[in-house]
Amino acid sequence: MTLIEYSLAVFSGPDSIKDFLHPENQITPMVELPAVLNPFLKDGVHIFAKCEYLRPLLNIKSLQVLGMLKDAQNQGMLTGVHTLVENTSGNTGFSLGVIAKVFGIPNVKLVVPYDIAPGKIEMLRIAGTQIEPCKTGGIQKAREMGAHDGFLNLDQYANPANPQAIERWIAPQIWRQTGGKISVFCAGLGTTGTIIGVAQFLKRVKSKALIVGVNLAPDHAVPGVRTLKRLEESSLDWGLLVDYRVEMEAKESYKKSLELCRLGIVAGPSSGFALAGLLKFLSQHDSNLHRNEDGEVVAVFICPDTPFPYLDKYSTYLDPEDF
């Protein structure tokens, strides 16, 4: 299903970096999975990976960061700000470290989980951010720090500009790339900005399309997604937009990520998490699927980032025979 024609991507002049990073100048591929990763293909269910890890900063959060900063700028909130503060598991922080400079903000201070992957720590250092580990209450701590003069907390867990960026820049791409045939959309639940943004768009243009959210099982860890308990920390109202919710564990997430990588879709554990959740949903709800006029189902899941910041975790969660 090749529906988009690529143009030459050359960015030059004084705004070259700004143009390079802008989502309107980027089209991320959508790749159908072969039968080896899609046991439902024989039943007319086509599964596509939306490869958001192929954006310039190698993660989907760069869109939300840009959207929140543009919104803050339009509201005059960046005047006098010298430091952005955010609670993050990594990708938002890395994107802030880079994109803040485009907006003339020199400093980014990040409140991160104490058990953050070492690879993520190195990425955040590369981006020039200041890192403050925190065991609990990171969201509130970032909000308190952001209230000081010269500081600003964009607050990705409550900021409506987070899902609005996805609704503006990702959802229409998915719609065009599937030719309007999307039947199911699936994403992991973290800040919930991605699933809210896509859902709001799809509910307007195709109400029969199903929205599937995947939450993390208790006492499991996958970067970027949350348990139901920890989802209570987000103020974004995802519950009204999600039609089905499934729960997924860490091992299967890393296993599916490994399988995607070996096919050439170099996607990280949160991507495997979304795929595993989608497959679980499809196995349980075949009779609930809306089929297009051709009798087929088009399902899309999000691949938010690469496996590279988490390489040490694969051997932790997977057995030798998985490799």
Image: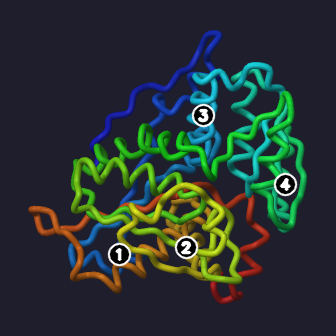
Nearer the N terminus, badge 1 or badge 4?
1
Q: Mark 4 points at which residue?
A: 121
Q: Residue drawn 50% across and 40% down?
A: 165
How far apart are labels 1 and 2 at the CA level? 25 Å
In contact (CB < 8 Å): disc 3 and disc 4: no
Q: Mark 2 points at which residue?
A: 215
> Residue 26 appears at what percent x and percent y?
48, 34
Q: Given this view, does label 3 or label 4 mark the residue nearer the observer? A: 3
Secondary structure type for disc 1? loop
Residue occupying the far top of the picture:
13
Q: Residue drawn 86% across and 45% down?
A: 125
Secondary structure type for disc 4? helix
Which of 187 and 204 lies nearest the eye of the viewer? 204
Question: Dot 1: within a 10 Å radius of its alpha carbon, few (fewer than 14), some, or many (20 or more) residues?
Answer: few
How far apart are labels 1 and 4 at the CA level? 36 Å
The reply, left or right, for residue 231 in relation to residue 152 is left
Which of 267 and 321 lies nearest the eye of the viewer? 267
Q: Mark 3 points at which residue?
A: 66
Q: From this viewpoint, is residue 293 visible? A: yes
Q: Is residue 169 above or below residue 120?
A: above
> Residue 292 appears at what percent x and percent y?
15, 63
Residue flagged by tag 4: what amino acid is it? Ile
In contact (CB < 8 Å): disc 1 and disc 2: no
Q: Given this view, does label 1 or label 2 mark the residue nearer the observer? A: 2
